[in-house]
Image (spheres, grey):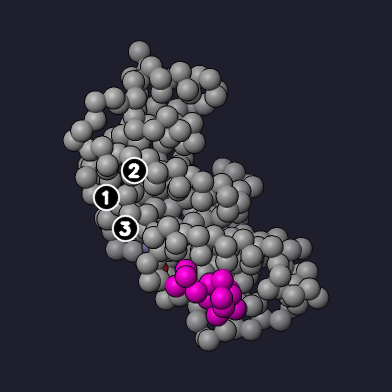
Amino acid sequence: MKNILEAPFIKEISDITANMYRLGWDERNGGNISYLLTEKEVSEYLDITKVIREIPLGFQADEIVLNKYFLVTGTGKYFKNVKGDPENNLGIVRISNKGDKAELLWGYKDGGKFTSEFPAHLMSHAARLKVDPLNRIVMHTHPTYTICMGACLPTDEKIFTRKLWKSNTEAVVVFPEGIGVLPCMICGTNEIGEATAEKMKTFRLVSWTNHGIYGVGHNIDEAFGLIETVEKTAQIYMLTLGHVVNEIPDEVIIGLAKLWNLKMMPGVIDEK
Ligand code: 2HA
Ligand code: ZN
């Protein structure tokens, strides 16, 4: 059996959490990541018949994630500490075949458990897997300018999407389907999980007003790249708010979508 601390997925999540902390997005225990692993990947490092503990989920997991393996950041744990101590700050769980429990195979060494946002993560995985079987990552973080921008706009995904597309020519290219928006809600609940997963049927990005953002992808780079592009664009928006003279013309946004053969979220730009 190989040493799990040398597994590429442990290295990737350790590197990205350290990076996100350094970006100032994940204060204290802010942010959480879940990474869908294959049985083959896990079996190279762990005896998958050895369950350390069973942890109740508190909700019924969707059929599509039953018996699936997830690497998940721990509740109350700090992104800045993951790299130095992966076994305390991370865990690998398998969703039980009844979908009511998580079977801990590794990690949460001090007796901890998965993030309080695991309902939103697991429900989002299920929603994305139904539209994109290659999706593996759900990433949640608190990027400063994205939160500022959400506070300055009505909770309307067409308006949020339009402001982003009009501020940075990369935006429409990176997320032509737009960004989903939820109003301010109580986090850590099944309700916000269900609302997020509903948005994930159409969007790879969901803004939680006054809180942060969710991004998904086939791998860490993709999920991070989506969020990073929103945050960079939100920074441009916030720094120019009230001063803009040169807003990106609608024709340029339409031209970019044509050039890259992208299907834009309807109703955001008047395509005439
Ligand atoms: O885990 O980010 O949304 C801390 C949070 C809650
Ligand atoms: Zn959060």
The quarter of the picture where residue 211 lies is: bottom left
Give the mark toward the camera: 1 or 3. Answer: 1
Q: Is residue 262 visible?
A: yes
What quarter of the picture does the N terminus occupy? bottom right
Q: What residue appears at the point 55 percent right and 23 percent down from the top-left corner?
A: 261
Q: What residue appears at the point 38 percent right and 71 percent down from the top-left corner?
A: 28
* Residue 148 - label: 1
Q: Which residue is mark 2?
A: 234
Q: Position of residue 272 (x, y in %)?
A: 35, 13
What kind of residue is marked 2?
Answer: Ala
Query: Crowding at label 2, few (<14), some or many (≥20) Cα neighbours within 10 Å?
Result: many
Position of 204 with respect to 47 (left or right) is left
Residue 42 belongs to magenta span? no
* Residue 211 - label: 3
Mark 3 lies within 8 Å of ligand 2 (Cβ measured):
yes
Q: Is residue 23 above or below residue 78?
A: above
Residue farthest along the right direction in this orientation: 1
What kind of residue is marked 3?
Answer: His
* Foreground pick, 7 / 194: 7
Marks 1,3: beta carbons within 8 A: no
Going from N to C along the chain, the mark reached first, 2 or 1, is: 1
Q: Is residue 68 visible?
A: no
Query: Magenta region: which residues?
Result: 78-91
Q: Position of residue 18 (x, y in %)?
A: 51, 64
Marks 2,1: beta carbons within 8 A: yes
Going from N to C along the chain, the mark reached first, 3 or 2, is: 3
Position of 133 with respect to 145 (left or right) is right
